[in-house]
Image (tube, rainbow, N blue to C red):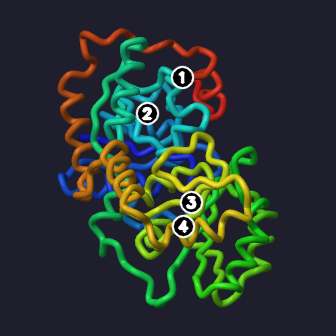
Amino acid sequence: MRFLLYLSQNYSFEILRPLAREMLSHHHQVKWFVEGNEVNKSLFLDEEVLLTNIDEVIAFNPHATFLPGNLVPSFVPGLKVQLFHGFEWKKKGHFRIRGCFDLYCTQGPFFTDKFNELRAQHPHFTVTETGWTKLDPLFSEPPHQTATSEAPTLLYAPTFSPSLTSTEALLDTIVTLSHQYPWRWKVKFHPKMDKATVTKYLRHQHQKLEVVGSSSIIPLLQQCDVMISDTSSAITEFLLLGKPVITFKNAQPEAVLINIDEAAQLEHSVLKALSPDATLQAEIAAYSKKMHPYTDGHSAQRVLQATLEELDLFPRKENVAKPQNWFRNLKLRKRLGYWK
């Protein structure tokens, strides 16, 4: 089979590479395509084949195209598979049906149920629960490593969304606590975080407060004991390891979170998170089963199997035609320079 991996952001590499490895291990053809100017092409590995323009994509004639983004051109041949770029359903647009995809590969029962409800209203796609490919290394590569320091390690991973981020509200408190306690702080920003905000935190770095610049958050999820965030997809990723999360003014706070509304509450919340009670631990376990029950590191394998099964039936007779999306596809044609 010929498979196309379609990306427009650097964070997509972590989502697509486990799938690429699985496909190649079964001797499928795999090629990549970049839309826009946000992807650093130097991140591609020597063995990864990059198609340089949309004409090459059409000539490749993929049986299926996979992407964690929201839009894919209808004029690209084959099945269109949605992989999702995160868990943050609280952000606007996560459950928006844009009429681009034939197969949604969902992370867990919470998402599967919701997309099946939407399918009843928009019966042009199929839903299969597979788990999320990005998390395969979380459970299959030296799992759950711990930090070398005896002191607890705290991960601060805020969202970049201006209306939701906690970066300004928590900066002074985080710096103060980093000097008062032996805790080690790791700060991991989203690639889209405002550069001025990043600079502010960099100015306050010291032996126990580090801004981590690595592209992957997975090693930090494994190493840290507690996460502090706001409304970010990384929250769920951390909870799946059975570890507590503190959120600042979360968009829709839940019992699984230690949510605070004032920066002054952060100190007490960290102390609570470092010694979680049985009730919180039970909430985390139940939440994990609902959001992503797969801890075997084989979600990419399930996505590939779901795709092959869907291709055997594609196009499904019971599915109605996808919306034409004339205006959206016209914009994509203009963006990609394709008028054939």
Q: Earlier in the sequence, mark 3 or mark 2?
A: 2
Q: Nearer the viewer, residue 285 or 88?
A: 285
* Gap in angstroms between the C-alphas marked 4 and 3: 23 Å
Residue 281, x across and y down, in percent = 37, 59
Residue 18: x, y in percent? 33, 57
Q: Which residue has dot 2 on it?
A: 58
Position above or below: 132 against 146 = above
Question: What distance separates the C-alpha of mark 4 from that of mark 1?
Answer: 37 Å
Decide: few, some or many residues near mark 4? Use Cα within 10 Å; few <14, some 14-19, many ≥20.
Answer: some
Name the amino acid, label 3: Ile
Q: Position of residue 329 (x, y in %)?
A: 58, 22
- Residue receiving disc 4: 215
For mark 2, give the secondary structure.
helix
- Image point 64% across, 85% down: which residue? 181
Give the spatial CA distance, label 2 vs label 4.
31 Å
Residue at image location 44% in from the left, 89% down from the top: 148
| The label number, if any, that marks residue 95 in the structure image | none
The answer to whether marks 2 and 1 mark residues whose Cβ atoms lie closer than 8 Å is: yes
Q: Quadrant of residue 215?
A: bottom right
Mark closer to the observer (3, 2):
3
Q: Are marks 3 and 1 in contact (CB under 8 Å)?
A: no
Question: Element at badge 4?
Answer: loop
What element does badge 3 sit on?
strand
Q: Residues under labels 2 and 1: Cα distance?
A: 10 Å
Q: Nearer the viewer, mark 3 or mark 1?
A: 3
Identify the residue position indicated by label 1 in the image: 340
Amino acid of disc 4: Ser
On screen, 336 above or below 160? Answer: above
Q: Left or right: 45 with respect to 266? A: left
Residue 61 visible in rendering:
no
Residue drawn at x 39%, y 55% is 279
Between label 4 and label 3, give the one nearer the viewer: 3
